[in-house]
Amino acid sequence: MLEKVKEIVADSLGADVSTLTAESSFKEDLGADSLDLFEMVMAFEEEFGREIPTEDLEQLTTIGAVVAYLEK
């Protein structure tokens, strides 16, 4: 699942997938803004068939946080 999340992040933000880690922060490391984050969440929902409520978005600050969230 980590690799798939990294692929979505790389596609969404134009990042090099090989530079992404579970610790990569969307805002600090990758410069994502709120629109970028919204688009990524939509891509995660589509890929993993799971709805992510708005109130949960603030916990999703890193790639690892997204993986942990989707796995529970």
Image: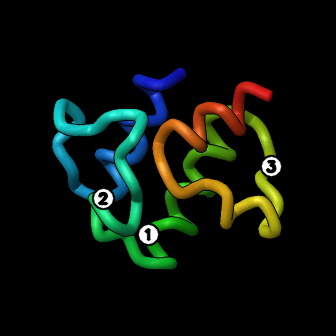
Query: Are discs 1 and 2 less than 8 Å apart at CB?
Result: yes
Residue 58 drawn at (x, y percent): 67, 66
Query: Are discs 3 and 2 less than 8 Å apart at CB?
Result: no
Left or right of 23 on screen, residue 62: right
Residue 8 drawn at (x, y percent): 42, 42
21 versus 2 height, above or below = below
Disc 1 marks which amino acid? Asp
Quarter the C terminus occupies: top right
Left or right of 5 on screen, residue 45: right
56 versus 3 height, above or below = below
Counting residues from the start of the chain, the first of labels 1 and 3 encountered is 1
Quarter the N terminus occupies: top right
Residue marked by disc 3:
51
Residue at 42% in and 34% down: 22
> What's the mark number on residue 13?
2
Counting residues from the start of the chain, the first of labels 1 and 2 encountered is 2
Disc 3 marks which amino acid? Glu
- Locate residue 30: give its quadrant: bottom left
Q: Secondary structure at mark 1?
A: helix
Q: Secondary structure at mark 2?
A: helix
- Locate residue 56: give its quadrant: bottom right
Residue at 65% in and 32% down: 68
Camera-side residue of 1 and 26: 26
9 versus 4 height, above or below = below
Q: Secondary structure at mark 3?
A: loop
Residue at 48% in and 49% down: 62
> What's the mark number on residue 36?
1
Counting residues from the start of the chain, the first of labels 3 and 2 encountered is 2
CA distance for labels 3 and 2: 21 Å
